[in-house]
Each structure stands twice: as C-alpha cells, then as structure tokens.
Image: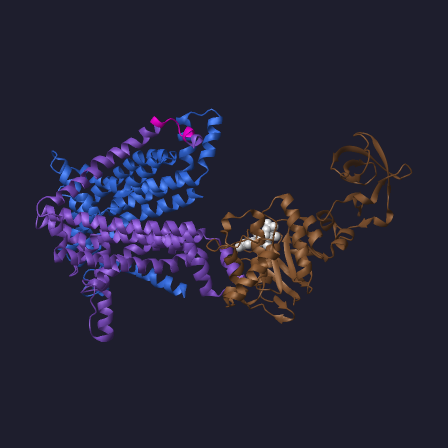
Chain colours: A purple, B blue, C brown
C-alpha cells in the first residue's frame, strides 16, 4: 500500500490532479441534480407526478422496451461476438468495423433509419406491397421503437462481448470437447460461464442507455410514449418544471437501481468465474 | 448457424445506412432511384444547416481537449490511490453516464440557465458534453493504467532518478497512449452524436448537428433528411475509421 | 483396453503457407508411452492435435485408432483424454466438478460419478481438495487435476502437451516419477510432448525426435541415445564429442588412461555433485569444438593436459 502511493508522488499532488474534474462534477452535475431532486418536493410533489396514470404507463413501457431490447441485443451479440472472435475469414476486419460503426450514430439518425426501413415510404412497406399487396408499416409503433433501440444497442454489445470472447482461453473449449462435450454442452458449460460477466455488464449498459434514450422516440413520434419523451413534453410544451423534475428523478432512480442490481450480479459472477 | 445470424445482424445494421445514403441522392424517393440521382438535396442541406455542422465539430474538438486535460490526470490520480475514497470518487465521476441525459440537462438549466448569457452561449453545451463524455475517457485511461505494468516501469524510472514530471511525460503517457486514443475516439464520436442532453440545452443560437438533423426530419421532405444523414455520415466516418486504425496500431 | 494409434501420411499446412508438419507416418503401439521430443516450433503440438482431432490433416492424411479410420471424427467423439499445456481447468467448476466433467457429459449417474471422482482424487493424491476452487491450487495440484480430469472417463488414448511445462525443476522431477508409476499401472497408450530430453528418456518407452515438421527418428530411449540417426538427434538427446570426419562419441566413451592414444587440454571444469564435468580442447587432427567428459574423484586443473582412451565400439558414424 505504502509503496503504491509513494510511487504516485505526494497526496497533495494527486489531489491537485483530481480537483478540476471534481469541481466540474460538483458544480455542473451534483448541484443541478440536487436542485432537481429538491424541486420535485415542491409544488404538486413527487407522488402526484409519478402516480399519474400517464407517468406510470410511460414508465412501464420504457422499462419493458429497455428490458426487451437489452435481452435481445445481448443474446444476438453473444452469438455474433463469439463468432467474430473465433473465426478468421477474409473481410473480417471490415465487417467488424461496419458492425461497430453505428455506435456513433445519434438516436435521431437511428429513428430516421427505422422510418426509411419500416415507415410509410419504407423498404419493408414496398417489399410487402409488391409481395402481398399490402404495405407493412411498423415504424411508428412499439415494434418500430424496438427496432431502433436494438439498432443502437447491438454495436456496443457486440464490441464488448467480442473483446470478452477474445480473452477466453480457446483451450477451455478444446478441453471440454476432448472430454466428450458436444457443441451445446460447450456453449453451456464453458462459453456462457466465461462470457457471463461481459453479458451482464453489456446488458446493464444497454438497459441504462435505452432508459435514457430520447432521439429515436423523438424522430419516430410514436404512439408509445417513453419516459424521456414525456419529460421533454412536460418541460417544453407544458412548461411544468415540477413534473418534469419529478419524472427525471424517477427515471434516474429506476435506471440506477437496475444498474446496481446488475453490478451485484456480475460481481458475484466474476467471483465465481 | 452463427454465421447466418452474423450475416443477418450485419444486414440489419448496414442495410439502412446504405438505404439512407441512396435516398439522399435520389431526385424523388417516391418514384425510386429510377427518377434519377441528384446532389441538389445535399446542396440544400449545406445552405440550411452548415452552421450546425460547424458548431458540432467545434464542440467535439473542445470537448476532446477538455476531457483530455481533466480526465488523464484524474485517471492517473485514481489509479494510484488505493483508498476507498478514491473508489467512491471514481464511482461519482462515472455517474453522469448512468443518469439519463435529459435529467442532467434539466438540472443544468435549473441552476445555470439564468446566469447572464450563459444559456445561449456554446460553452453551455460544452459543459454538458464534457460531463457526459468524461466518464468514457476516464474508463479507457484507467483500464490502460491498470493493464500495463506501469507501476514497475515507473519505479524503474524513479530508480533512474526521474522526477514526477519526467516520469509522467516520459513513461506513463507513452505507455497508455492506446487507452488515451481509444478514449479520444469514444469522446469525439459521442460528442458529435449527443442528443439526449443537447436537445434541451441547445437554443436557436446554439444548434448542433443532431438537433439540426431532428429538425430536418421533422420539417423537411424525406430526401432532405436523407441528404443531411449522408452529410453526417461523410463527416463522421472518415475520422472514426482513421482513429480506429490508429488506436489499433498503437494498441499492440 | 488401450489402442494402437496410427498417423498415416499426415501433413498439416496453414493458410499462410506454413508447413507445421510434413507428410508423416507414425505408429504408437497399444500400451506404449511415447515422448514427442524436439525444439520449439518443430511440430509437436501439431502432431498431438492431429491425434486428438483438434486439427485435421491435409488431404491424403489419415488417423487410425486400432485400424479404424477416425480422421473425420471430431475430438468429442474420439474418446481420448487430453492434458493441455496450461491445463485449461474450468474456472467455474471446483476440483471435483472438473474431474467429473467428462462423466457428466456422458450422462453417468451421479452416484457412480461421485465414486469415480473420489477414486481419481485418491489416485492423483488430491484427497480432501474436491471442493477447492481451481484458482486456489498450487501448480503441481493443478497439473494433477488436469490429469485426473483426462483419466476419469477411462480413455483408451492419453495425450499430454508439455505436462510439466509450467512447473519448476524440482516439482517436475517429483511429478515425473509419479506419472511414470501411474502410467505403468494404467497401461493406457500415452503420447506426451516435451522439449526436455531428460524427461523424454525417463518417461517414454519410445521417443520420437522431430525437427522442422519432420520425424528424424523413432525408437527406444536407449536406441536413440546409442544409435542416433544423425548429428542433430545425437546432439539433441545428449552430448557428442567430435572425433574428426563423421566420427563422434558420447562423453562416457572417453576415459583418462596414461596409455591412451588421444589427448586434450582442460579448459574448464564444473563440479556437479556426484561427478565433475570437464570441457577439453581436443588435440586430435580434424576434431572440432570441445570435448566433454564426466569424472569422479580428483580432477586435473585447468590448463593441464590429459591422455585419454576411447572405447572403439562406442564410436558413432553420424551423417550431417
Ligand atoms: N495457426 C497457425 N498459423 C500458422 N502457423 C502456425 C499456426 N500454428 C502453428 N504454426 C506453426 O507451425 C509450426 C509447428 O507448431 P507447433 O505448435 O506444432 O510447434 P511445437 O513443436 O509444439 O513448439 P513448442 O515447443 O514451442 O510448443 C511452428 O512453426 C508454428 O509457428
Ligand atoms: Mg507446443
């Protein structure tokens, strides 16, 4: 311990290195959040705001959507990530680059891509009209939101899980096979336990991102109202600061609780691995 | 089977991008590509939204500089302090990622929105972007600091008589450049694409590219939105690819 | 119980053009213990992986177990036991869970499995460690868990890749003796990889010496030592003293003798406990390099001249 801290120079120096970031955090993050939380207690109060049927419905839909997207994205990314980590084929690097590129797309762009895909003039619509004589349009429904959220969740999950799969010792898979394990046994007994911490971690990040995502819903303007959209509407259209603040706190708290639970789960997984 | 699934996922992720690029140069999307190709929409986008592109690039650059100056020293101090307080501070500093952007934005407006002309100045956006991207820089640099056998290297440098400044610049920074680059890549991309927080923070005076995009999607015809998306991709992709290649080269 | 394994005309190339193994035919007799010996990169692991079914031979190569073609059979269906270089113990299972895995996969009932695991724990002297996590084991214990895991399903062919590679010298010797005793009782056809000639000679009743993807010689340790196929093999499995031309001898073929016909000047001596190792500059026309011989008792000082006699029956004629 002493050796460690000695090698980093005196305490004051380290404090000085850390101070600017902490000041920023305090002034522009902790203080505003505290103010936000306080505001919720004034006026109508938290309880009224968050127990309004509209709020509860939005919360339920947001959590449902985020959970569904997280599970699907992690499941798909586990297969794709492991495949990309283990196989070597021409064009693999290009494929990896293309798969991870959409990570940088803002939610609004993703929403627009969904419109192009499944909107009124979308590709899916044209194809289904040509085939069945009826346009399939799902961009503005829950399915459209799901497609969009899946779109921006997949790249990050793939990147994380691929890195974890690359760190898995291939000899473990070979050892299981040498003992007679078939494909699914190897997946169940070696690959999934080895990837578990990464799966939980990327699922948690995915969930948190989905809970706070605004852009996709903003572009799609769906019938399903997600919580961030509701907050935006309350603030800009209804200029109802107290309600917006209460809902923000609700959204933040829900996200934080789920993340903490996932952290605990992945901690115990990592300890077992 | 995994190969088929990978192909489907790739199609899902890449197909719409190609579709959008095509729509951006199509004269009339309703009639399809047969109606002819044109750059008219791109030109129109440039006229209408060039200022949002400029602001976003400038913001991303400033954000990168800020996160480097704030994040690298902070990460170093955190990595070298094995106390519980340090873990707590690390937790705090990465909190802005877990809190929904719209909540942070609301708080910022509440506390700082009425201070002078701050609200309509671009630095108001910068604050938000730095808050949101700093955790990513911190994490990338922390991972690099903890991965490399830096402590031993630094002790070796001490044994050679190097002082703190010499060690930090000569031994620490060169050995974590992979992590710094990875962080820089992330910060730049996230700043250019940030919308959740920016939507509330931006004003007509300070409109960023994603907010402009949202505006075009809402109020312009499909081809204009597509053209704008195309411009966005053309701006975003080359630097991302370059930085990715660079960080891969330096990473090993 | 044990089987005869045969590699028939097996080669192995990689897409980048590397030929890890040139076409090779090798037979491993039932119940024999064979050491694959050679310098790093010579193709030992490749050969072992071909036998295991973890790699496919190039077209034209076949792998036969007791005359049955198993070339197309993947590793999980070959019924072999394998010990990996760094053991590859499953971190999410305890010691007993690792050892019992092969039985679990085969659907062996719980009670039978527990009994077999207990037997393996006893056999490998790991009693009482069944519920230990594998990352809380010493290097030697891990090695034994890996061995127990490979042996538990009663394989007919046991493959070991550098089983002692990750251990320190003293532990290696202890475990080597243990493994030798175990293999003698089990009589499973065993093939192990090593680049340590002492280990190969001590443990194997057959030694296969390889270089750059080719087999140079296969034979008993004694045969390989006393009649090496060429200079490389001779040097790799022991020390050679050059006598001029294609003539060589082992250190023990030379002995101090005032009536001897050969001479040399002592360069340096190393006391090695039971004996002293002498390096001499030969004073024989045509002899290149240094000679080495081992002496008991008192040793001439550096710089002094020695007269030596040669056991002429022990002269080796070795091509380059
Ligand atoms: N995936 C691969 N692609 C290309 N060449 C390879 C590959 N795997 C192994 N080789 C090459 O094949 C040759 C034989 O490798 P192998 O692993 O069999 O050697 P080895 O005798 O086990 O060496 P060591 O004692 O170092 O383990 C080496 O030259 C190696 O570089
Ligand atoms: Mg090897």
Where's the N terminus of chain C, which quadrant?
bottom right
Which residue is rendered at x = 24% and y = 41% of the image? B129
The x and y percentages for residue C80 are 58, 63
> Is B57 located above or below residue A148 in the figure?
above
The x and y percentages for residue C51 are 60, 62
Pick out the residue farthest to the right: C259
Query: Is A110 a magenta residue?
Result: no
Q: Left or right: B117 with respect to C130? A: left
- The foreground one among C298 and B76 is C298
Pick out the residue farthest to the bottom: A132
Give the quadrant of residue B122.
top left
> Is B114 located above or below residue A16 in the figure?
below
> Is C47 located above or below residue B198 in the figure?
below
The x and y percentages for residue A108 are 21, 53
Q: Exactly how many numbered labels are in the figure?
A: 0
Which residue is rendered at x = 28% and y = 48% of the image? B236
Magenta stretch, residue numbers: A5-12
Q: Left or right: C92 with respect to A18? A: right
Residue C175 in sight here: yes
> Is A14 located above or below residue B20 in the figure?
above
Residue C33 in sight here: no
Which residue is rendered at x = 20% and y = 67% of the image? A137
Which residue is rendered at x = 53% and y = 62% of the image? C114
- The foreground one among C290 and B70 is B70
- The foreground one among B232 and C219 is C219
Q: Left or right: A147 with respect to A12? A: left
The x and y percentages for residue A217 are 19, 56
Q: Main secondary structure of the magenta part?
A: helix
């Amino acid at each position: 311990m002493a050796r460690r801290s000695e090698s980093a120079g005196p305490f004051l120096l380290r404090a000085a290195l850390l101070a600017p970031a902490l000041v920023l955090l305090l002034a522009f993050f902790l203080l505003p959040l505290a103010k936000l939380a306080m505001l919720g207690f004034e006026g109508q109060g938290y309880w009224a705001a968050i127990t309004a049927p509209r709020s509860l419905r939005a919360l339920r839909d947001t959590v449902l959507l985020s959970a569904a997207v997280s599970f699907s994205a992690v499941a798909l990314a586990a297969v794709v990530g492991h495949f990309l980590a283990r196989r070597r084929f021409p064009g693999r690097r290009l494929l990896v680059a293309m798969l991870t590129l959409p990570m940088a797309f803002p939610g609004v762009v993703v929403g627009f891509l969904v419109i192009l895909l499944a909107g009124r003039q979308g590709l899916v619509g044209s194809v289904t009209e040509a085939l069945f004589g009826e346009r399939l349009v799902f961009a503005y429904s829950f399915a459209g939101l799901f497609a969009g959220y899946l779109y921006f969740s997949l790249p990050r999950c793939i990147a994380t899980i691929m890195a974890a799969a690359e760190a898995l010792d291939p000899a473990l898979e070979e050892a299981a096979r040498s003992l007679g394990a078939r494909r699914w046994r190897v997946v169940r007994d070696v690959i999934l336990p080895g990837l578990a911490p990464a799966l939980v971690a990327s699922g948690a990040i995915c969930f948190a991102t989905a809970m706070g995502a605004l852009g996709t819903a903003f572009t799609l303007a769906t019938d399903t109202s997600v919580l961030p959209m509701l907050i935006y509407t309350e603030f800009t259209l209804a200029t109802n600061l107290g309600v917006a603040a209460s809902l923000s706190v609700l959204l933040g708290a829900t996200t934080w609780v789920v993340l903490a639970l996932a952290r605990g789960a992945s901690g115990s997984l990592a300890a077992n691995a | 089977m995994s190969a088929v699934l990978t192909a489907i996922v790739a199609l899902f992720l890449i197909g719409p991008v190609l579709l959008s690029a095509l729509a951006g140069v199509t004269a009339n999307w309703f009639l399809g590509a047969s109606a002819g190709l044109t750059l008219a929409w791109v030109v129109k986008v440039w006229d209408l939204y060039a200022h949002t592109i400029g602001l976003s690039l400038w913001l991303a650059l400033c954000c990168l500089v800020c996160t480097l100056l704030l994040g690298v020293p902070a990460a170093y101090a955190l990595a070298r302090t094995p106390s519980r307080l340090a873990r707590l501070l690390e937790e705090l500093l990465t909190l802005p990622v877990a809190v929904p952007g719209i909540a942070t934005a609301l708080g910022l407006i509440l506390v700082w929105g009425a201070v002078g002309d701050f609200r309509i100045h671009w630095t108001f956006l910068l604050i938000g972007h730095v808050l949101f991207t700093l955790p990513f820089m911190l994490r990338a640099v922390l991972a690099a600091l903890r991965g490399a056998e830096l402590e031993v290297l630094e002790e070796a440098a001490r044994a050679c008589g190097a002082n703190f400044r010499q060690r930090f610049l000569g031994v620490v920074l060169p050995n974590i450049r992979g992590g710094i680059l990875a962080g820089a890549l992330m910060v730049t991309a996230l700043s250019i694409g940030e919308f959740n927080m920016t939507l509330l923070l931006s004003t007509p005076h300070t409109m960023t590219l994603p907010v402009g995009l949202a505006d075009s999607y809402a109020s312009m015809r499909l081809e204009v939105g597509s053209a704008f998306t195309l411009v966005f991709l053309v701006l975003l992709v080359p630097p991302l690819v370059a930085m990715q290649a660079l960080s891969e080269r330096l990473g090993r | 119980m044990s089987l005869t394994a045969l590699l028939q005309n097996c080669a192995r190339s990689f897409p980048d053009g590397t030929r890890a193994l040139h076409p090779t035919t090798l037979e491993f007799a039932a119940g024999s213990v064979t050491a694959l010996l050679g310098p790093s990169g010579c193709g030992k692991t490749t050969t072992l992986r071909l036998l295991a079914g973890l790699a496919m031979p190039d077209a034209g190569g076949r792998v036969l177990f007791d005359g049955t073609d198993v070339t197309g059979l993947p590793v999980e269906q070959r019924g072999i036991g394998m010990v990996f270089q760094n053991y590859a113990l499953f971190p999410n299972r305890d010691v007993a869970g690792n050892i019992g895995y092969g039985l679990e996969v085969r659907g062996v009932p719980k009670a039978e499995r527990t009994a077999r695991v207990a037997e393996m724990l006893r056999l490998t002297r790991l009693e009482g460690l069944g519920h230990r996590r594998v990352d809380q084991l010493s290097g030697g214990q891990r090695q034994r868990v890996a061995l127990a895991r490979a042996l538990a399903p009663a394989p007919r062919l046991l493959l070991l890749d550098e089983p002692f590679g990750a251990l320190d010298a003293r532990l290696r010797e202890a475990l080597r003796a243990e493994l030798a005793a175990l293999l003698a009782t089990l009589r499973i056809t065993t093939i192990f990889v090593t680049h340590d000639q002492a280990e190969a000679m001590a443990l194997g009743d057959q030694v296969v010496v390889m270089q750059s993807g080719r087999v140079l010689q296969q034979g008993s340790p004694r045969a390989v030592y006393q009649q090496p196929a060429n200079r490389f093999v001779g040097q790799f499995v022991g020390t050679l003293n050059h006598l001029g031309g294609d003539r060589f001898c082992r250190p023990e073929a030379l002995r101090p003798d005032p009536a001897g016909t050969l001479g040399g000047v002592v360069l340096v001596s190393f006391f090695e406990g039971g004996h002293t190792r002498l390096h001499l500059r030969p004073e024989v026309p045509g002899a290149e390099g240094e000679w080495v011989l081992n002496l008991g008792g008192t040793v001439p000082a550096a710089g002094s001249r020695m007269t030596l006699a040669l056991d002429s029956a022990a002269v080796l004629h070795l091509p380059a």
